[in-house]
Amino acid sequence: MADPSSPESNTETPPVESSSAPAREVVTSDNEAAELLRESATRLRSELAKVIVGQHEVIEQMLIAMFCGGHSILIGVPGLAKTLLVSTLARLLNLSFRRIQFTPDLMPSDITGTDILQEDPDSGLRSFRFLEGPIFANMLLADEINRTPPKTQAALLEAMQERKVTVGQQTTELPSPFFVVATQNPIEQEGTYNLPEAQLDRFIFSIRVGYPEEEEELEIMKRTRAPDSIELAPVLSENDIIRIQELVPTVPAADHVYRFALKLVRRSRPEEPDAPGYIRDSLSFGAGPRAAQYLMTAAKARALLRGRFHVNLADIARVAVPVLSHRLITNFNADAEGVTPQSLVNRLLEDLTRENTKD
């Protein structure tokens, strides 16, 4: 049985030289789509390396979330190029991009749009016309999402789950593909609002953005060109992305892989009989069924990115922390002792790996 901690699962694909081949517009078969994803992942990393230094794990998790058709939240201190990463990805994927700076005075209509009264110049008749908000884009960056009240945060719920917006009696479909990428500052908590659990559950990934390595930071210091002045070669079209999203659920996985993912999720729930003592001592609530679904979907997308049309345990292990960490609610004891959801997920993975090794 495969080991989630195997060397393959910890290897990051380094940036390679850019290919000048034009992006293909449409793919027609599963094999072609799989090949397109492998090629495109290499080219995306290459093009991103022109603007973004390092952050290979963050980039891979972003690509996995997008090819799953899911939303992600980036957590990191200011100055780590979170906004630049998202906008650059939109450029490379030929997607329309909008950024909303979330503030305490932001209203739901500032996101979704609103009805405006319009008068016909010929007849003089007045009628309401829906004016679309910035959410009507392929990729929406919700910058510092926790700085706006829950009422405004809730304006994203329908859009994230149903891919549509309802204002008054009118429901409007959002463009496809559609992604929400939120950012959150983990340090400054004054003037912030916790995201409701129902909204956090809509994000397939919670991605931790850390400081660059020493040599990477040196490279950042040496760069003098503005990101907007750097020429980038588009890699995928909207049709390509949609086709890849349709391909991801079809990637097969063995029953023992499903069982591994299911055990991981169920043991994160303190009320479960098989939950370890450290889970009961540290968590108020564990991950729900949506987490198990996202865990398998993300593992399938990672397998494709790695050039495989099957899922192994290493895929589950590598996506477990970003899928589960924001769904685990720690209690007072855990907070007082500095126990984090990430450490609990890693501990569960270690336990399950030992069990599989014995089997």
Image (cartoon, grey):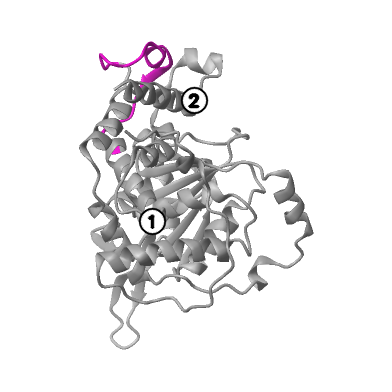
Residue visible at 73% across and 55% down in the picture: 220
Residue tagged 2: 343
Q: CA distance from mark 2 to mark 1?
A: 29 Å
Percent position of residue 354, x then y: 38, 22
Q: Which amino acid lies under the numbered mark 2 shown in the image of this protein?
A: Ser
Kindly identify which numbered label has been placed on residue 307: 1
Q: Nearer the viewer, residue 305 or 355?
A: 355
Rendered image quadrant of residue 213 = top right
Q: Secondary structure at mark 2?
A: helix
Q: Position of residue 190 (x, y in %)?
A: 61, 33
Neighbour tally class for label 1: few under 14, some 14-19, many 20 plus, Cα within 10 Å: some
* Residue 232 located left or right of residue 25: right
Q: Is residue 41 visible?
A: yes
Q: Is residue 286 magenta?
A: yes
Front-most of 301 and 308?
308
What amino acid is found at the position of numbered circle 1 in the picture? Gly
Whole-percent x, y for residue 35 in the image: 36, 65
Residue 328, placed above or below residue 315: above
Q: Residue furthest left?
A: 255
Question: Under tag 1, what secondary structure?
Answer: loop
Image quadrant for the C terminus? top left
Q: Is residue 118 magenta?
A: no
Closer to the camera in the image, 140 or 85:
85
- Label 2 CA crowd tier, 10 Å (few <14, some 14–19, many 20+): few
Q: Residue at x 56, y 19 (%)?
A: 338
In this picture, which residue range is highlighted in magenta? 271-290
Residue at figure coordinates x 46%, y 79% from the top left: 22
State whether residue 176 appears in this view.
no
